[in-house]
Every structure is written in C-alpha cells, then in structure tokens.
Image (tube, grey):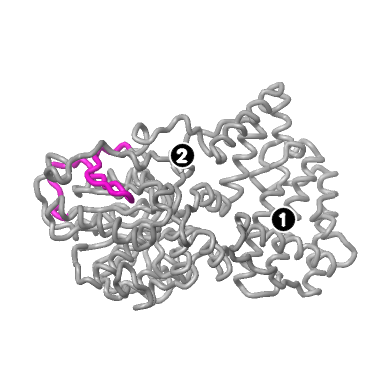
Amino acid sequence: MSESNRVLSGLDPMAAGQQWIDSLTTVWLQAMAGTPLKPGEAAMPAAPKLSIAPEKLAEIQQDYQKEAASIWLDVLSGRAPLKDRRFADPAWQKNPWATYTAAMYLLNARTLMRMAEAIEGDEKTRNRIRFAVEQWVAAAAPTNFFALNVEAQQKALQTQGVSIAKGLQNLLEDLRRGHISMTDESLFEVGRNVATTEGAVVYENELFQLIEYKPLTPTVHERPFLLIPPCINKYYILDLQPDNSLIRYAVSQGHRTFVISWRNPDESLANKTWDDYIEDAAIRAISVVQDITQSPQINTLGFCVGGTILATALGVLAARGDDTVASATFLTTLIDFTETGVLDVFIDEAFVRYREAQLGHGGLLKGQELATTFSFLRPNDLVWNYVVGNYLKGETPPPFDLLYWNADSTNLPGPFYAWYLRNTYLENNLVKPGKLTVCGEKLDLRKVRQPVYIYGSREDHIVPIGGAYASTQVLRGKKRFVMGASGHIAGVINPPTANKRSHWTREDGKFPSTVEEWIAGATEHPGSWWPDWARWLAAHAGDSIPAPKTYGRGRKYRAIEPAPGRYVKAKA
C-alpha cells in the first residue's frame, strides 16, 4: 500500500492528518529552497504552522474509505472508468490490477487536494500547499514508473525490448542536453526553419542586437515600430514560422519593423542591473531606431517581461520630458503586480532575501532553472508527459516549433533578477509614484501618457487576465484593452490565417476597476485579435512613405550580419 493510502486509512484521523501535513511541509520547504544554501547565505523560511479541523479531516477520511471500497467492487465487476487522459490507453482497462492502481491513485489525488483545500491558514500559505500537493500528486502517478505503467510494459514486449533501449538512449541524450526533450530538436535550427523573416542586424552592444526587417510592401508607415521581447526567452517566439510570425505580420502591414534580440548573458554580464537593461537596452534601442529612421517618434511593443521593461523605460523617458515614443502595445504584461497568479507561491520576504544573498551582488540565474520552474507550473503537460514518452516508451517527441523555442533557455544577470523580484513581485513598487529611482529618475507611471494597446489572455497562468487588465488602471493615456482566448503563448501567437479562438473588445471606452466588470460589458469576436491591433497601430503610425532600399543608415548603422544574428544562437 502506498504511503498516502496508509496515512489516509489510519485509525486516528488527527494523527493521519498531522503526518500528511508534516510530510507536505517538508516537500514545500524543499521546493521553495530550489538550490542548496552556501555559507553565509540567508536561511529559508521555517515550516509554516498548518492544521485541519478534526471534523473536516474525519469527513474526508470517511469519504475516502467509502470510495476506496466502491473502487474495489467496480474493478471486480469490470466497471471502473478511468476519467483521465493519462490512462486512456486500453491497456489500463484490460488489466484489473492496473485499473485498480490507477483508480486508487486518482482517489488519492482527489483526497489530497481536498485536504489541501481544508487547511486552515492564510491564503498565500494555502496556495503554496495546493501547489506542493499538485507537484506531489503529478510526480506520484503510476504512469511515471515502468513497474506500474502497463502501457510501457506492453510496448516493451511488442518491440522485444527496443523501446527500453531507445528510452535509455533518450535519457542519456537529455542528460547531456541538460533538459527533458519536448520535441525532436534535431529538426530545428534558428535561422534555417525558425526565426526566418529576412532582415539584418544594424546595431549591437553587450546587451542586445537590433534587427531591422526587410520591407514586404512598397511603402511603409513613417513611424517605425520596435518590438521588445522578454529577456527571459529568445525573441523568436515572435517569429517562429512565416505563417505564425507576429514580426512578419507587422512587416506585411507596412511597418518598418525592428526587434531587440537579447544577448544570452555569460559571466561577463553577471553584474548587470535593471537600470542597465532600461538605459543601455530599451532606451538605447528606442534612440537607435529613431536615429536610423530619422523619425521624430516611433511606436513600440513589449511582450511579457519585455512589456515591464518597456513600461519602466517609458516612465524614465516621461521623467526626462522625452516624447520619442508615440504609442505602446503591451502583450500579456504585468505592470501592477497585485495579481500574479501561480508564481506568487514562490515569492515572500525570506525567499527574496535568499535570492538577493545568492545573486544580488553578481552571478547568473541559469536558464535551465528558469525553464524548469516554468515547466513545473504545468507538470503533467510539460514534465511527466515527456518522462513517460521519452524514457518509459522510448518515443521521439513530434516536431513542434513552440516547444523547441521553449527549451532554448536564457540566463539572467543576478542583480537584474534580484531587483526584479523585490520591486515587482514582492513589493509592487513600479506603481507607487516616486518609490523607485531608475536610471537616475524618480519613476511615476502616471506621467506615461502615450496611447496604449493592452492585450491579455483569458487562461494565462503566468500573467493572469486580471493582472494584464490592471495596467488600464495605471496608465493614463488613451487605452484599448483586448482579451484573447487561451494562454500566455497560444493566445498571443494566434495569426488570422489560423482562424482559431476568439477575442473580446469593449467599445464604450469604459475601464471599470476589475476585469470581471470589463468582461461583463465586452463583446466576443471569433478569430484572432491581430487585425484589431493592426488597425489600432496603423492609426498611430503616420503617413506612408517609400520603403527603404537598404538596412540601417550610412556607415554608422550598416548591416553587421543577416538576421537572426549571433546573439540569439548562443546557448545558456
């Protein structure tokens, strides 16, 4: 009998509940610690005090015992449906022992989640416990163990052991790569079949390369367009394939388009700060685009953390009286960090102090650590699914450009990361007028008066829709908010040609205090939000002028190398 079975079927519900709570607390603390402490580093938090009301625990135990007995009878009678896609293969239903194992696992999972919901404590601690339970439950699935996975065993017999040999080979290759393969990475190459929109690098410094794209139209809008992607990922999420490239779409709409391609930091950048990324990257790129195009103003877009960087840069420019930026688009961006979703489980004073002691004075946050954290936000889809397929079944995952990009991780400078944790997720200082001094300027985002287009994805687990919408309450210029279906990436990368998903708009110009109120007055439209954004951006892009015949401008900004450039190809 598994540990969770023994705990839940004990005679004393209070003792059983406390045993479970103690073990779960240990799991939570290990998850929060991340990496071992070094001498002199700040300690992690003490174990939280948790309890469940005795009557509630007794009710859960009684229900568990009743359902466990029912499962046994259903298995004996051949009536035990497994309503979980991990057990969809007929092999799980054909073998009574496998059926019973899977059914009991699902019961244990439901019961543990009920116990997590019943824990008495503050909401943040409860959220952390729920997260820890989800991780524990996902890892404990019988599908994850060859000895219990009848589907993998059946495949081993059918292939006469070839699947086992291939699984070991896959495991060794992934150990060499340093991450679990989510796609056949051998089929992709940056610049060959991803990040292929034609262009050239026209400027570079130690933090970024600036790529200018070749026009696809005989004329372009007089105001150029600069995209700032997140520095925690490679920019080509915006340029995966020609038919789903937001960059190519912008070019095809007649915009003279530029994008920041962030350098993947190495030890030479280990001391770079948030101020460096604002002054020497975002603001520098804005200045270079203006200089190349000789346009008095430019339009900008920030995606995810790139949007937070853009908002900060706009605040600095506003303090300097600089109106170079005519408009800004924010895609799944947090500016007000009141509602941060599942990532909030990692953030408190002790954890931020720990990271500050570890990285705040120099060093690199490794890209693999970031990638692993984001993968475990959806453990069944982005971790255990591939453990089972790659290693237990010996399968090669199918080619998928988005998952290739997802595995192409980037490092972050430690001081940049530590500043970001404290001043956004922990203290929410960006929206406090005068609280922060960035690049020598007191930051007050109320002074950011540019027209803004704000997009949020309804099912986003990284930037919740309420967090994206909160920017409407901070920025004071003329606003348009649009909500799309799906999540953080799929909602954004939704080209019109795919004819997928819906988006919602509201035309009365009202921005009530909550996204729920906004949705109540919104209208659903089938298909992509891109055309709506294209119309909005065109209205802020000025007249048409002849498209440039060459990249850059003169000797100062001549083409350095073809897009996508060197920086994006550097591995973490």
Nearest the viewer among 138 and 325 is 325
Residue 320 at x, y = what percent? 22, 71
Nearest the viewer among 88 and 477 is 477
Alpha carbon distance from label 2 to label 1 = 31 Å
SS for dot 1 = helix
Left or right placement of residue 256 versus residue 240 in this view: left
Residue 70 at x, y = what percent? 83, 54
Is residue 494 found inside the magenta-colored segment of the image? no
- Amino acid type for the residue under numbered disc 2: Tyr
Q: Residue at x 25, y 70 (%)?
A: 478
Is residue 216 at all visible to an observer of this figure? no
Which of the two discs, 2 and 1, sits closer to the camera? 2
Return the mark for residue 404.
2
- Amino acid type for the residue under numbered disc 1: Ala
Farthest residue, direction right? 11
Left or right placement of residue 547 versus residue 431 in this view: left
Is residue 200 found inside the magenta-colored segment of the image? yes
Depicted 284 relative to depicted 509: above or below: above
Q: Which residue is mark 1?
A: 109
Farthest residue, direction left? 546
Residue 38 at x, y = what percent? 61, 57
Left or right placement of residue 490 versus residue 140 in this view: left
- Per the rendered image, the range of residues in magenta is 196-223
